[in-house]
Amino acid sequence: MSMTIAVATARISRQLPEAEVSLDSALLASAQLMETILLTSGQEGQEPYARQAALMRLARAQCLLIESQNNMLRLHEEMLGIGKEIKAVGDDDGNCPKPTGLLERAPLRRIA
């Protein structure tokens, strides 16, 4: 199914920020979960390292969320560039992020 450039532009302009916010929300929720786990750790006679594996998995999930945020920013820059190239967007309202140079930099190394 095909759609016009105007329809695609409108959808992308709405959906891209929604996707960015959802990643922010997921990272915030995982940080709150980390706080709760850390605050309850060691209570009720539990061994100090009993939750270490869970904390490590949660930390890895947070790293992946941050990596996803980075990719979403790169996507936003790429889509803005395409939109400007085909004269579909102009960013007159200032909703798009300022260019960060992420697209020109070497890819980030995985740390875990």
Image: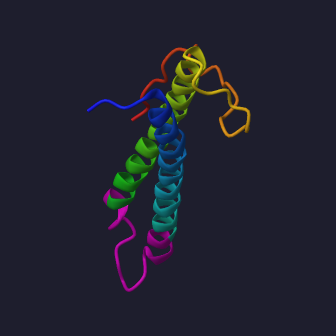
Viewer-side residue, 112 vs 42: 112
Reply yes or no: does residue 43 show up in magenta.
Answer: yes
Viewer-side residue, 109 vs 12: 12
State which quarter of the image contains the N terminus: top left
Q: Main secondary structure of the magenta part?
A: loop
**How is this picture coloured?**
rainbow
Left or right of residue 57, residue 13 in this image: right
The image shows residue 31 at horizontal and vertical percentages of 51, 60
Reply yes or no: does residue 61 show up in magenta.
Answer: no
What residue lies at 43% left-to-right and 73% top-to-bottom? 41
What residue lies at 53% left-to-right and 59% top-to-bottom? 28
The image shows residue 26 at horizontal and vertical percentages of 46, 56
What residue lies at 45% left-to-right and 49% top-to-bottom? 62
The image quarter in which residue 51 lies = bottom left
**Number of numbered labels in the structure image:** 0
What residue lies at 48% left-to-right and 53% top-to-bottom? 22
Left or right of residue 105, residue 95 in this image: right
Left or right of residue 95, residue 19 in this image: left
Which residue is most to the left? 1
Viewer-side residue, 60 vs 88: 88
Viewer-side residue, 82 vs 5: 5
Q: Is residue 50 above or below residue 8?
A: below
State which quarter of the image contains the C terminus: top left
Q: Give, as a single range, the part of the protein colored magenta.
A: 36-53
The image shows residue 111 at horizontal and vertical percentages of 44, 32
